[in-house]
Amino acid sequence: MEPIIELRNISKNFGGITALNSVSLEVNEGEVVGLIGDNGAGKSTLIKTLVGVHQPDLGEIFIRGQRADNWNAKKAREAKIETVFQDRALTPQQSIVWNIFMGKELRYPLGFIRVKEQQDQANRIIREIGFTSKLIDAKSQVGNLSGGERQGVAIARAIYNDAELIILDEPTTALSLIETQKVFDFVNNIKAKGRSVLFIGHNIFHVFDISDRFVILDRGKVVHQLEKSDVDSPENLIKIMKETVEKGE
Amino acid sequence: MNKEYTINSFISENSRPLSSLFYFVLIMTIFFTSSPEVFFSPKFHQAVLTVYPIIIFLVIPLVFVVTMGEIDLSFASNFAFASWIFSLLIKTFSIDPFLAFLFGILAGAFIGVLMGCLVVYGRISSLVASLGALFLIRGFLFVVSDSKSITIIEIRNHWIYDLLVGKFFGLPMQFIWAGIFVIISYFLYHRHVFGAHIHHIGDNPESAAQMGINVDRTRIFCFMFCGIGAALAGMFSTLVNFTWWPTQGFGYLLLALASVFVGGTPTWGGVGTIFGAVFGSGVIAYMETGIVAMGWSGLWRQFFNGLIIILALLGHRFHGNRIR
Ligand SMILES: Nc1ncnc2c1ncn2[C@@H]1O[C@H](COP(=O)(O)OP(=O)(O)OP(=O)(O)O)[C@@H](O)[C@H]1O
Ligand SMILES: [Mg+2]
């Protein structure tokens, strides 16, 4: 079967900095891929290029076997790829509803928004992700939420948009243990539905638990692609990562 | 949900427009108490009635631009550019005034698109770009018109005159058009993807781009909208006066800007209010004409204008700072 998304020899420079150096990567249907690497390895740049936020300097992107020309963020969302960005990509002065439907508003003809429908859906989503505060509703401003709650909004936006590939860039950073567990439940849920996840995390134990396959990025290069069966344990994965860093230096 | 809750949430959700309304009522109360006879004389309101709709056409699109985190000063010259096209087509080329009106709107939109492209592709700050355009367009008009005005008194006999600036049961038609403009703009601003995207872009352009919003295109459209508003204002003003003149619209530059901020739209982008701007324009329009009508010395006009702007902005500070 065709991979949902495939990158071939993607390179990306920012001025003099080479953030990605001929990176190739694929994500297949129904698999969870863990993308790991040190700070500044290029993980976020990789996923931003993948979803069309950055344009690659070199290389090609294929979506379900089709070459993606003039790839951009809008097209990526139309292709059912949703992303939780590391910076969350929220607009703090706007309401939760507007954030959840940002860029994918429910529309009448001529671009008018289905206000009531959005409101109802957002309230349902808020209940499902289980915000504890009673004061929060769809109209609450995102900027008044806690860090964890904001993250919840960003994750909810990705999950409830019926995506086939969900990309999570360090989704658990500001979360409590219980909330982290919730994110893992979400990921397992998505996988059970036959959808795919690209998961970026700093906590190797988390990434190990959740992923079927690992891609290790180091200074803009893919240095390892490993099946879970090749790795055995998170300790092993950490060892492999340490070795690559030392080899590089 | 009890009644008290709905009233409270209405107030908290609309605090900006409501406080602008408060300033408007306050100004009117001051005028009323200082001289009730003048207040109820038609003369007092007449001047306002001609200025007010024109300010509305300028101010509402500015609310969009400011919400988007940008500014456009070129409207004050675009005002005269569009109405120059309008007057020229009628006077020199004898084109049907209705067609000329449509061309005038196109001309305003065209300048707006140019402004947008300059900001988006030229990567110049909109403040500086539009400041340049403000002088450039005005300069162009001085040169091409040889600093002479154009009179189009004959327009009086055309149906478009009655339709646009005639009287409807005593009410100037431009009031009705401005009202329609406000309502359409309100829906665009709050219930249309254009308005939603403008809010997101003004709030955090990176987030908007990451979520697939076409930031560049939306920005250009927003400047275009501003150009259309300026064109409407310019042509309405020309119709009311039967005359185009090369410095036309310049006096509205600071008045329209002040109306946006007195109206409760903050300078930082991401939030704003259409109805607040309507009340803000009311405050400014009455300050402009009311003081003299009240029989006070016109020398005080600018002083009071400045005072009310500063006081209103201090008042709006209670709505809090930017949430990040
Ligand atoms: N917009 C940008 N402009 C300039 N340089 C950038 C930009 N984005 C990323 N970089 C550079 O590219 C490199 C890779 O950054 P990236 O954010 O992809 O790393 P990362 O692996 O996600 O790191 P972290 O784990 O800290 O999030 C860094 O050196 C960074 O400074
Ligand atoms: Mg990162």
Image: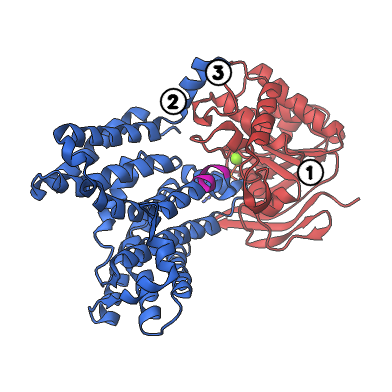
Chain colours: A red, B blue
Position of the C terminus of chain A by quadrant: top right
Q: Give how far across and how far down residue B122 sits, in percent.
A: 44, 65
**Of residues A248 and B206, the one drawn nearer to the viewer in this rendering:** B206
Please tell me whether mark 2 sits on a helix, a strand or a loop.
Answer: helix
Please tell me whether mark 3 sits on a helix, a strand or a loop.
Answer: loop
- Cα distance between the residues tagged 3 and 1: 46 Å
In reply to whether residue A173 is colored magenta, the answer given is: no
- Residue of label 2: B11
- Cα distance between the residues tagged 3 and 2: 17 Å
Confirm if mark 3 falls within 8 A of ligand 2: no
- Residue of label 1: A225
Q: Nearer the viewer, mark 3 or mark 2?
A: 2
Q: Give how far across and how far down residue A209 sits, in percent.
A: 78, 26
Query: As shown in the figure, which amino acid type bears the numbered disc 1?
Result: Gln
For disc 3, the neighbor class at 10 Å (few under 14, some 14 to 19, many from 20) is few
- Residue at 38% in and 61% down: B166
Q: Give how far across and how far down residue A32 sits, in percent.
A: 80, 37
Labels 3 and 2 touching (C-beta < 8 A): no
Confirm if mark 1 falls within 8 A of ligand 1: no
- Residue of label 3: A135
Please provide the residue range marked out in magenta.
B186-191
Looking at the image, residue A77 sits to the left or right of residue A53; the answer is right
Q: Nearer the viewer, mark 3 or mark 1?
A: 3
**Of residues B296 and B167, the one drawn nearer to the viewer in this rendering:** B167
Q: Earlier in the sequence, mark 3 or mark 1?
A: 3
Q: Nearer the viewer, mark 1 or mark 2?
A: 2
